[in-house]
Amino acid sequence: PQRYTYEFTEREELFTVSFFGEEYKKALTFCGRNSGRDVDKAKETGLTPKELGGSMSFEEAEIVLICKKQYVGRLEEKCFIDKEPLKWYADKDYHYMIIGKIEKVLIKEV
């Protein structure tokens, strides 16, 4: 819930899962380490936002899954079989898990 992306996934019916080539590793690392609340990720990385009929991705993505939310639930400490990942939740601010139905698969032609 502390992530900026959470606002969008909470509000919207659709979400995307995007896959990029290795050449975008540096840009994606930047995106993972910086919040869209604080920086314009597209401007900082050179990625090109792309609207996809109710959801967003980037022009540079090689594969995009457009998904419709089916289930949303908060992760719970007691449900972690492997306790190692709990180190990332010192404040017990667990992520939400979203299960989606794939509505469309887009594959970039090269």
Image (cartoon, grey):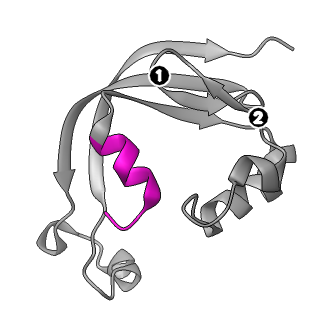
Question: Mark 2 falls on what kind of element?
Answer: loop
| Residue indicated by mark 1 | 66
Name which residue lies at 36% across and 50% down: 7
CA–CA distance in space, label 1 to label 2: 17 Å
Question: Mark 1 falls on what kind of element?
Answer: strand
Q: Nearer the viewer, residue 69 or 54?
A: 54
Q: Position of residue 27 (x, y in %)?
A: 78, 54
Q: Given the image, on which type of amino acid does mark 2 rest?
A: Thr
* Classed neighbour count for the residue bearing mark 2: other residues with Cα under 10 Å, few (<14), some (14–19), many (≥20): few
Name which residue lies at 21% across and 62% down: 75
Q: Given the image, on which type of amino acid does mark 1 rest?
A: Ile
Determine whether, in the image, residue 46 is placed left or right of residue 38.
right
What are the residue bounds of the magenta stretch?
1-10
Is residue 3 located in the magenta-colored stretch of the structure?
Answer: yes
Q: Position of residue 9 (x, y in %)?
A: 35, 42
Determine whether, in the image, residue 12 is placed left or right of residue 37.
left
Mark nearest the camera among 1 and 2 is: 2
Is residue 53 located in the magenta-colored stretch of the structure?
Answer: no
Q: Is residue 65 above or below residue 3?
A: above
Query: Which numbered marker is on residue 2?
Result: none
| Residue indicated by mark 2 | 48
Name which residue lies at 15% across and 66% down: 79
* Classed neighbour count for the residue bearing mark 1: other residues with Cα under 10 Å, few (<14), some (14–19), many (≥20): many
